[in-house]
Image (tube, rainbow, N blue to C red):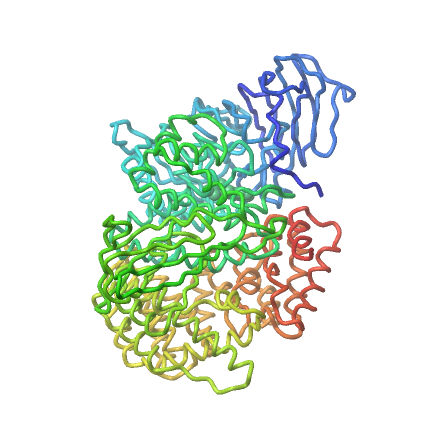
């Protein structure tokens, strides 16, 4: 497979002015007719007109009214080239495709009884021949024709121009998108759907029509998506001054979908998982996912659609920025400082759980990659989540106001354009008259920087010095790294736990100072510090780095008790836990007795029982670092030892704090009608974490409690948590599992939960997974279902996935290959479960290598999977 390099970018030889598309929709053979008006691009020297096309049949090709014979163009490797084309070109192209056989879910495909499209990143070429690249922006008019009975709803981007009957049982709808857009934002839907709709008044007074389209029977699950959409529209107006530019905005839910959702102009297409919710079927986490994803796709309308990417290497320009925007939206929707901190803690967890490992593994790449084989493999936590951290750092460095000025200038300069990450950085720098040259390294250098800090107190001079050193580990293709521009937010705590006022170079800085670390080593001198303080470093996780500081237990306990920055308060608890988890894992390996000290338990007890603290924050403090996060801290990973250590610690906590946990369990009931608001969700979260601690191992009292909660639950959060606790403890939950399935077998998203809970339970071995795969509800064809069992097992059940005999690796290889034949994008995601194989104990590595080699040798194999496994093996 061919590697594509960022440095090889050349402008398109032809630009497209208008596109008219006609679809005769038929699952077995859809005819696509396109009329494309092109013009030579003066920025290009080439007169070769290049069109992409994949998995489609060319029926006819006319240029400027004349049929082209096969000797007047070349089709090679999915590229159609017309050499030496005239300056003005009208192309008329007829192609066919087979939506019902399109299991890749890219391009035009069928799901259930409807047609749907997914064109990002390179799906439009699976619909028609076209210069399918994001820097070719055009105006689209679309005519849809289909059987009226089967496909009563016909949707595309923009505004509905007309609709009517064709007389032969078929009907049509004509749509026009007034905004020019890249082909990846094209969408159509033809299906039997119903919608919740509402007229909504923008701040300007203009009225817009909002619609949420779902399959019949799901209309009782659209309220939250609609509410989230309205909140998103209002928030974008209020926080950024950005208005919805269309008269109509539609969301469509589809159950077969590769990712979360897609921001097609005016016609967002969503995975049902991020639309459908009612208290009976959806958990608090589902509700907050819906809010975030509805927001995310809506915010793309400006950051992605109005201003788009020049090329796919710039993906983080839209994704990092839009994730940052959805994170801020979710935090603002909660509205309290403590709620905001809880959302931030979640973000830090995701970074450590997924992004740091990616940045240290074979697929490590900069936020703006330099090369790829398959672009679909680069919709990563690095591009999305680290990209969002990079955007957040601008805000930390420039302040909220400065950041807003930068955003305003970005839109002023680039509305309607396809641009680069550098253009965003330039807008931030220019709007604030700041030099952000060095900041570019966040885009160009992969790897997680390490910031090592040491502190020195000079009592005589009343000076406290912090010396910061930065380094960054080598990553594939990048050995030596230059220093980053890192904002490090710091506070100093006195012995009473209060923040000290900070003075640097005679300047008073309040109680949190943002230090700008730009050199390999820098020392900052705080003046007027009478006694040695405890430093609280990297407050609010001000940069995506690993912080090293030789904290003593006493210092961490002090921070865990007093830090005014809730993120660092939580962090101190995580460090205390991590130290213990690592020692316990070593003790397991050395066959030594396991013990948990009272000091730690007492610190946890204090947080658990502190009613001044929000329930959601207490819940976060109670959750121990995951097995994956612990593994990242070990030189050689022993998954069973990690699992035993963590289980031991959870059991010890559950036993020592039994009385307090029971009290908290009782205190945090949420009687009355279900509401997904942050306070209620926080209470449920704390209550259910308490239940999980009480039920680390089966015991009569806790099994009874969980059984009662399961039976009496009035919402899915409590029901699923009770069942999950039972299954994860190893208690006999057969009765509840059957009841759950029987009650919810008609709700696909709940059945996904049923599989996922079992897939991730530590008692589920590979034989059990194979058995579950024989269940009539299991299918590899639906990505949500495949993810629910296979991904849960391979990614969230480390002690079983890494079984000593390598049987689960074989299972993994077999299913990566099977999935690849259906859906390479999903297969490549599963392939990534093995990324960190070189860090495991040697005996496991042998099996892992063998499994990777088996996949690499499979034929045929998609570029998607080939890229992942070959990078893992190299
Ligand atoms: N921009 C969207 C990306 C996306 C996607 C990419 C590849 C294959 C399928 C896909 N579905 C959606 C989603 C987003 O970030 O908003
Ligand atoms: Zn996005």
Residue 373: quarter of image: top right
- Between 426 and 414, the residue placed more toward the observer is 426
- Between 731 and 865, the residue placed more toward the observer is 865
Question: Residue 244 at x, y = what percent?
Answer: 35, 31
Q: Which image quarter is the N terminus in?
A: top right
Instruction: Identify the residue at the far front of this view.
Output: 460
Report whether 202 appears left or right of 75: left
Question: Residue 702 at x, y = what percent?
Answer: 36, 79
Regarding residue 822, the answer to whether it shows in the image is yes
Report whether 853 appears left or right of 439: right
Residue 571: quarter of image: bottom left
Report whether 607 appears left or right of 706: left
Report whether 109 appears left or right of 524: right
- Between 487 and 245, the residue placed more toward the observer is 487
Instruction: Identify the residue at the far right of this view.
Output: 71
Residue 98, placed above or below residue 505 = above
Question: Residue 713 at x, y = what percent?
Answer: 33, 67
Callout count: 0
- Between 744 and 791, the residue placed more toward the observer is 791
Question: Residue 388 at x, y = what percent?
Answer: 43, 46
Residue 363, placed above or below residue 754 = above
């Amino acid at each position: 497979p061919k590697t594509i390099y960022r440095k090889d970018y050349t402008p398109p030889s032809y630009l497209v002015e208008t596109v008219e598309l006609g679809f005769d929709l038929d699952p077995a053979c859809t005819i696509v007719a396109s009329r494309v008006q092109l013009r030579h691009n003066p920025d290009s020297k080439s007169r070769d007109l290049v069109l992409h096309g994949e998995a489609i049949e060319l029926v006819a090709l006319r240029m400027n009214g004349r049929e082209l014979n096969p000797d007047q163009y070349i089709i090679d490797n999915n590229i159609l080239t017309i050499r030496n084309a005239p300056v003005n070109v009208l192309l008329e192209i007829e192609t066919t495709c087979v939506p019902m056989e399109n299991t890749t879910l890219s391009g035009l495909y069928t799901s259930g009884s409807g047609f749907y499209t997914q064109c990002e990143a390179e799906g439009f070429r699976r619909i028609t021949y076209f210069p399918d690249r994001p820097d070719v922006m055009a105006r689209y008019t679309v005519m849809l024709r289909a059987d009226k009975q089967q496909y009563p709803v016909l949707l595309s981007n923009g505004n509905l121009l007309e609709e009517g009957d064709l007389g032969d049982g078929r009907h049509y709808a004509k749509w026009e998108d007034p905004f020019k857009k890249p082909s990846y934002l094209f969408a159509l839907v033809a299906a039997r759907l119903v919608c919740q709709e509402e007229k909504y008044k923008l701040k300007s007074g203009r009225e817009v029509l909002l619609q949420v389209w779902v399959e019949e029977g799901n209309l009782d699950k659209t309220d939250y998506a609609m509410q989230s959409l309205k909140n998103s529209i209002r928030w974008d107006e209020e926080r950024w001054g950005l208005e919805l530019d269309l008269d109509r905005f539609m969301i469509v839910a589809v159950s077969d979908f590769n990712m979360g959702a897609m921001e097609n102009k005016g016609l967002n297409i969503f995975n049902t998982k991020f639309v459908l919710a009612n208290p009976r079927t959806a958990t608090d986490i589902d509700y907050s996912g819906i809010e975030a994803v509805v927001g995310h796709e809506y915010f793309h309308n400006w950051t992605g659609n109005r201003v788009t990417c020049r090329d796919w290497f710039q993906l983080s320009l839209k994704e990092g920025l839009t994730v940052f925007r959805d994170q801020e939206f979710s935090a603002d929707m909660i509205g309290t400082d403590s709620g905001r901190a809880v959302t931030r803690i979640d973000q830090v967890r995701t970074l450590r759980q997924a992004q740091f490992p990616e940045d240290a593994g074979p697929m490590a790449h900069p936020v703006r990659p330099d090369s790829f084989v398959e672009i679909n493999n680069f919709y990563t936590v690095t591009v999305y989540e680290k990209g969002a951290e990079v955007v957040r750092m601008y805000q930390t460095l420039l302040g909220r106001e400065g950041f807003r000025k930068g955003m305003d200038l970005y839109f002023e300069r680039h509305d309607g354009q396809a641009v680069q990450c550098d253009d965003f950085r330039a807008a931030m720098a220019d709007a604030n008259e700041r030099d952000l040259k060095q900041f570019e390294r966040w885009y160009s250098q992969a790897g997680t920087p390490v910031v090592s800090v040491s502190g020195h107190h000079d009592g005589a001079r009343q000076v406290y010095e912090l010396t910061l050193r930065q380094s960054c580990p080598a990553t594939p293709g990048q050995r030596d790294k230059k220093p980053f521009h890192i904002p490090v937010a710091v506070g100093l705590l006195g012995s009473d736990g209060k923040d000290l006022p900070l003075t640097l170079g005679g300047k008073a800085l309040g109680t949190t100072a943002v230090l700008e670390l730009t050199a390999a080593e820098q020392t900052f001198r705080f003046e007027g510090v009478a006694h040695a303080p405890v430093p609280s470093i990297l407050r609010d996780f001000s940069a995506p780095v690993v912080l090293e500081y030789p904290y003593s237990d006493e210092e961490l306990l002090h921070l865990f008790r007093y830090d005014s920055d809730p993120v660092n308060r939580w962090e101190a608890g995580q460090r205390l836990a991590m130290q213990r988890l690592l020692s316990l894992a070593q003790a397991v390996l050395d066959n030594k007795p396991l013990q948990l000290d009272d000091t730690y338990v007492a610190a946890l007890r204090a947080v658990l029982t502190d009613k001044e603290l929000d329930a959601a924050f207490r819940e976060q403090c109670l959750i121990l670092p995951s097995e994956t996060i612990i593994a990242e801290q070990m030189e050689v990973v022993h998954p069973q030892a990690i699992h035993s250590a963590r289980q031991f610690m959870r059991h010890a906590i559950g036993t020592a704090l039994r009385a307090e946990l029971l009290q908290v369990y009782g205190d945090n009931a949420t009687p009355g009608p279900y509401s997904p608001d942050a306070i209620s969700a926080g209470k449920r979260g704390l209550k259910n974490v308490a239940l999980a601690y009480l039920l680390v191992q089966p015991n009569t009292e806790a099994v009874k409690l969980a059984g009662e909660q399961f039976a009496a639950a009035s919402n899915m959060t409590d029901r699923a948590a009770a069942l999950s606790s039972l299954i994860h403890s190893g208690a006999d939950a057969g009765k509840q599992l059957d009841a759950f399935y029987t009650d919810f077998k008609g709700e696909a998203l709940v059945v996904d939960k049923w599989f996922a809970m079992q897939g991730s339970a530590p008692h589920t071995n590979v034989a059990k997974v194979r058995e579950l795969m024989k269940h009539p509800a299991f299918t590899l064809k639906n990505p949500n279902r495949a993810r629910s069992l296979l991904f849960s097992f391979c990614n969230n059940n480390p002690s079983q996935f890494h079984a000593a005999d390598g049987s689960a690796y074989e299972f993994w290889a077999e299913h990566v290959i099977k999935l690849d034949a259906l859906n390479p994008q999903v297969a490549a995601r599963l392939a990534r479960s093995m990324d960190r194989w070189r860090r495991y104990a040697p005996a496991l590595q042998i099996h892992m290598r063998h499994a990777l080699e088996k996949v690499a040798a499979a034929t045929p194999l998609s570029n998607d999977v080939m890229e992942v496994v070959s990078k893992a093996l190299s």
